[in-house]
Image (tube, rainbow, N blue to C red):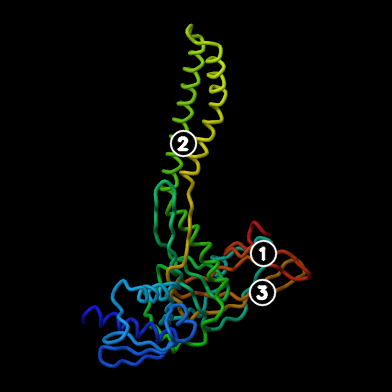
Amino acid sequence: MDSQERVLRFAQRFVECFGGVTEREGQALKVLLPSQLAQSLELPEETAFGEGQMPLPLGSPVLDRMIHAATASPPVVFGQISTEYLKKAGFAQILLRDFSFPNSRVSLGQTADTRTTYLLLYAHYTALSDERKEGQVQVAVQEKTGAVVEGFEDNWIWFPCTFFDPDNVPAHFPKDISSAVQAGLIRAKALALQDLADFIESMHRRLRRDVRHTREYYQALEKEMTAGLNHPTLGEAQKAERLTKIRALPDEAARKIEDLQRKYEIRLTVRPSGAIRLLVGVVQAMVTVQHRQWQRMVSLFWNPVTRAFDPLVCESCGASMHTVYCRAEDGRIALCCRDCG
């Protein structure tokens, strides 16, 4: 397959994915573009590419605009994990293992098999300072609750997985997963900072070194210029000029140090680079939480991939948690993390 045929096939898939209509005629491709797509590509809605029509050579502006539009949003695929076995008993012990409720009592109620969805978010990070450092991290989040599920991102690959055709995705997947994405990005930033620990320490070490050298330089310069004031050939006007320069040295040193701080400042950006959304069979357990005179039912999800309950989410700050503090709020129980409880 030559390069032009690859380009035409890409253009055909691109137009169809964005809601357009295509028709191949030999080495030509006729397309009918949605108005918004036509506007972004700077093309008429009815266009033809290929032999005898508009050329699409590699590096052409139209092809570049197609590639930019195709890669502007992170790719997302949908799949379903198959599990041979869902736990049937022993959840009371797992509840005590996975959670602690320091200021309340909990009791396990009914359990039932169900299905829920997980977002496996891939995030790319870039750290800019005097040097550049890049990398990628993975985070798993339960889409319904927004809880970060540690270990899922490493273990899901050991389970059989079937991927869905984009036009045949089950209705189990929620349309709005903004809270799950936000939770994933917050966790991704924390993981990126862990990965960058050596890089950050290196930049801090170089900053401390350069600041120390700068201070030593200006201290030596001030000492030298002060000693020169006693030179017999130095006139009064020259002494006054030198004194002015000596008095300005601390401010000049401070400006140099500020420049160094800007030079070694670390600017971190984290953005989604792709995602896998997975439908997983789980066990839903109903738990009664009692705090003082109030009671509340809470749903927990036993995850066969991690073989543990998914964390709960703090109802104040949104952090995932295994230690749950209860707080009375308007006649009901609020579930909070240690900092918010």
Counting residues from the start of the chain, the first of labels 2 and 3 encountered is 2
The residues tagged by marks 1 and 3 sit, at their Cα atoms, a distance apart of 20 Å
In the image shown, does 161 or 4 lie closer to the viewer?
A: 4
How many numbered discs, if any? 3
Q: Which mark is residue 288?
A: 3
Q: Which residue is mark 1?
A: 316
Whole-percent x, y for residue 298 in the image: 64, 74
Q: Is residue 20 left or right of residue 56?
A: right
Image marks 2 and 1: residues in contact by CB distance under 8 Å: no
Image marks 2 and 3: residues in contact by CB distance under 8 Å: no
Judge the density around disc 2: few (<14), some (14-19), many (≥20) Cα neighbours within 10 Å: some
In the image shown, does 14 or 335 lie closer to the viewer?
A: 14
Whole-percent x, y for residue 213 in the image: 44, 30
Counting residues from the start of the chain, the first of labels 1 and 3 encountered is 3
Q: Amino acid at mark 1?
A: Ser
* Residue at 48% across, 87% down: 170
Q: Nearer the viewer, mark 1 or mark 3?
A: 1
Image position of 93 with respect to 221: above or below = below
Image marks 1 and 3: residues in contact by CB distance under 8 Å: no
Of all residues, the one furthest to the top in this rendering is: 232
State the SS at label 2: helix
Counting residues from the start of the chain, the first of labels 2 and 1 encountered is 2
Image position of 240 with respect to 291: above or below = above
State the SS at label 1: loop
The quarter of the image holding the N terminus is bottom left
Q: Which residue is mark 2?
A: 208
Q: Nearer the viewer, mark 2 or mark 1?
A: 2
Question: Which quarter of the figure has residue 120?
Answer: bottom left
